[in-house]
Amino acid sequence: MISESTFTSSSNGHFGLIPSVVRAADAKLPTKYGDFRIAGYRSLVSDEEFVVAYRGELRTNDAVPVRIHSQCLTGDVFHSAKCDCGEQLQFAMETIAKEGHGAVVYQQQEGRGIGIINKIRAYALQDEGADTIEANVRLGLDVDSRRYEQCVEILKDLGIKRIKALTNNPDKIRAMRDGGLEIQERVPIEFEPSKDTQRYLSVKKFQMGHLLSLVTQS
């Protein structure tokens, strides 16, 4: 269990009463992890779209395993060794399948919000020695422009009240808590760092505050 003092509310965590997302589609989704459903949501305030893979009873007083997963085309689809994003997504799907219920909100904010083309440009700068933060800064881009309020709206639309958060990112925890969801537990998603991920994960832990225990300063 995580204590109330572990995560403080963010100053910009505002959630209005007027919905800013709408469910636009819903269908069955058989997967290698078992039978899920897939729902598509549209933002009413931007052109952003969201996808949710969910399974089982969500309108319950029990803690529901949930992951807000930021799109990573290189990791999720092409299985890039530069990050652990694809592995985290697989872990979440496996956990939800094992527990019989849960949801993954798939947020289409590639590269911490910079988009796939800029992410590839950032990769090129990383090839020259920059870390992920330095690369974004050199491109004149935000280090992390992601927002999670609409992801939280989606979780609430699904009927989820209490969360077992599958994440290492305290910003996602804050967003869920600021949005009125009860975080009963945080489940770490960690893998032994490799030569390709050591620096990436080090930046996440020591510069971005992610909750990682296996990473040393690089």
Image (cartoon, rainbow, N blue to C red):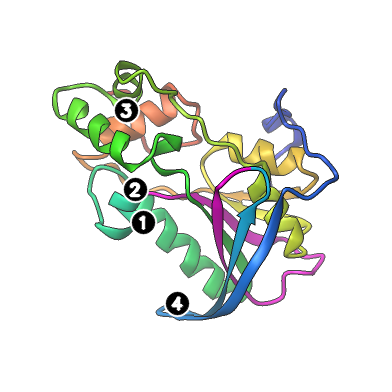
Where is mark 4, residue-wise? 33
Quick one: label 4 or label 3, which is nearer the N terminus?
Answer: 4
Where is mark 1, residue-wise? 87
Q: Residues within 10 Å of mark 4 (few under 14, many from 20)?
A: few
Q: Distance between the residues labelled 1 and 3?
A: 19 Å
Q: How far apart are marks 2 and 1 (CA)?
A: 5 Å
Where is mark 2, residue-wise? 84
Magenta segment range?
A: 46-72
* Extreme-right residue of the structure: 17
Q: Do the residues labelled 2 and 1 touch (CB within 8 Å)?
A: yes
How far across and down, in percent of the image, does residue 17 sit?
Answer: 85, 44
Q: In this view, does 46 lie to the left or right of 77?
A: right
Q: How crowded is mark 1: few (under 14 residues within 10 Å), some or many (20 or more)?
A: some
Front one among 108 and 159: 108
Quick one: label 4 or label 2, which is nearer the N terminus?
Answer: 4
Residue at (62%, 41%) from the top-left corner?
Answer: 148
Q: What amino acid is labelled 1 in the image? A: Glu
Quadrant of the image containing the C terminus: top left
